[in-house]
């Protein structure tokens, strides 16, 4: 089993992405989506949500040398990371202003790469 897979549960559906050896990708960005420590795609319940990376976890990006820790990502209902535009989050309109991975990160607990309107 390789590639994206949807597992239907009793109350929720889960999305995984498997390597050629059958193991799920964990703590990695693949195809614009974030897969967490259990190999399940992270997604928002409704609209957009901030997903904070747990302490001591490093997120890698498939096909890149990028590594992320102590940060958060904006994720939509389909599990895609927000790359551009403006989103309403925590009562604020947040507009992205620089490169796509840097744009969606809230690192070191701040909003350094964002403009809040």
Image (cartoon, rainbow, N blue to C red):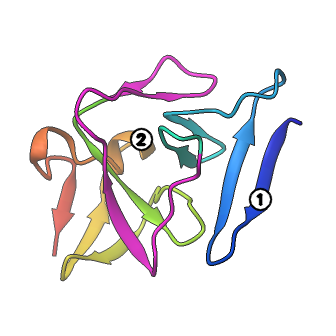
Against 11, residue 115 (above or below) is above
Which element is circle 1 on? strand
42 relative position to 107: left or right: right
Q: Is residue 44 magenta?
A: yes
Dot 1 alpha-carbon crowd within 10 angstroms: few under 14, some 14 to 19, many 20 or more? few
User: Which image quadrant: the N terminus?
Assistant: top right
Judged from this view, the residue extending furthest toward the front is 10
At 81% from the left and 28% from the top, the residue drawn is 22
Q: Residue 43, how many percent across, how many down?
A: 51, 63
- Which span is picked out in magenta? 40-68
Q: Residue at x 46, y 76 (%)?
A: 45
* Main secondary structure along the magenta-highlighted residues: loop
Q: Quadrant of the C terminus?
A: bottom left
Residue position for label 1: 6
Front one among 84 and 72: 72
Residue located beneath label 2 in the image = 101
Please tell me which residue lies in front, 30 or 114: 30
* Residue at x 47% of width, y 37% of height: 37
């Amino acid at each position: 089993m390789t590639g994206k897979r949807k597992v239907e549960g009793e109350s929720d559906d889960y999305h995984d992405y498997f390597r050629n050896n059958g193991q799920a990708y964990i703590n990695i960005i693949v195809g614009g989506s974030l897969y967490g420590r259990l190999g399940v795609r992270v997604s928002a319940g409704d609209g957009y949500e901030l997903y904070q990376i747990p302490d001591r976890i490093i997120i890698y990006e498939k096909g890149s040398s990028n590594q992320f820790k102590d940060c958060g990502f904006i994720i939509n209902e389909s599990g895609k990371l927000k790359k551009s535009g403006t989103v309403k989050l925590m009562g604020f309109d947040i507009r992205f202003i620089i490169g796509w991975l840097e744009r969606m990160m809230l690192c070191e607990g701040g909003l350094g790469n964002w403009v809040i309107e």
